[in-house]
Image: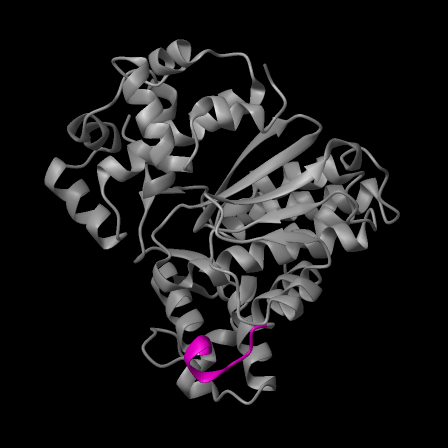
Amino acid sequence: MPVCSFSYQDKVLLLQHGSTELLALAQRRGAQLHKLLNGTSIFEQDLHKPHGRLHHADWLKLLQNCQQQLNSPELPFLLGSTLLNSRYISLCQSVQYAQNLRQALAQLYYFRHQLFPGIYAKVHRQQQKLVIELKPALGLMNQHSFMMTTVCALLISLLKLQPGSLAGVTIRLQQTAPGQLLQHQRYWGCDVSFNQPCDSLNLPLSLLHQQFADADPAKFRNARRTCLQLNRVLKAQRGLLENIYTLQQRALPILLTQQQVADALGISGSSLKRQLSQHQTNFAHLIDQVRRDAARKMLQQGYCSNRQLALKLGYSDEHNFRRAFKRWTGLLPSDFRNLFNFN
């Protein structure tokens, strides 16, 4: 059965799951509504419809309009916090009533398409930390930094609220360091580094099972029930880039061809190539990302030799693998392994 992917032109977002909050924040800072909506298919009367939906392309255009009208570096931080506390978003209500962080993160992961369909997460353990890597399910174009900051800000707001501690929490971002770095660090309230190979939030495993102060099983079940009902309106389709990543990740050490992926997606090879161009990427780059992430993960876990890694990632020999890893990280595999105190 072909894998379903949504595109920029699919109405995969509710207006009241981010757009109305963003518009309100921008207007309070002096932006004009008609200019914020310029270039989108959204009309002012749409904003008051309970289940009004918009295309992902419109969402990205709203972000672009906000950035053009406002010089407001705190906007994505405020949006993340506002989303978490919105009374219109059942998903965000449910995570606050969860028993602990583990249950809250599981809820966010399962229903992520209701809030951030353009982003997906890959989760793994690294020593005594849980690493949540955030990746674009669609090409986010110039709004990549804004979206990743917003998602991280929502998660940080949750941690500040419950369990109420950022001890040991770190954030790694691909974006370049902002000009006002100290002000940026103050927004986060935890250790942040920039120019990293991927966007990620790193949490101590000890935080996962701490009881939330506002845990309420009955309210959690009610909010989750609403999320399940909302799935009838917002189906859990995945973005094109996420689907390609998942298909290739599952196939390793076999490297899928572009035509094999197109067949799995139920589209022609030329259509896949055209869609990837619209996402400002190409097939070889996505396959390279899968191999890079798998190599980093296995090296961090510390149980594979270079020869084993080469075989697991579909390389013909160790030399080609070492050369690729140096290109990805600037380090040899042995140097990267030593960073995690493995022999």
Image quarter hosting the N terminus: top left
Residue drawn at 68 percent across, 65 percent down: 187
Residue drawn at 59 percent across, 77 percent down: 25
Residue lying farthest left?
270
Does residue 69 belong to the magenta stretch? Answer: yes
Residue lying farthest right?
213
Q: Nearer the viewer, residue 164 or 98?
A: 164
Corner quadrant of residue 246: top left
Image quarter hosting the C terminus: top right
Residue drawn at 83 percent across, 51 percent down: 164
Q: Is residue 122 above or below residue 34?
A: above
Q: Is residue 12 above or below residue 292?
A: below
Residue drawn at 43 percent across, 51 percent down: 118
Left or right for 215, reference 208: right
Does residue 173 belong to the magenta stretch? Answer: no
- In the image, the segment drawn in magenta is 66-73
Left or right for 269, reference 133: left
Left or right for 92, reference 140: right
Could you tell me residue 64's position as x and y percent?
A: 40, 72
Q: Nearer the viewer, residue 286 or 161?
A: 286
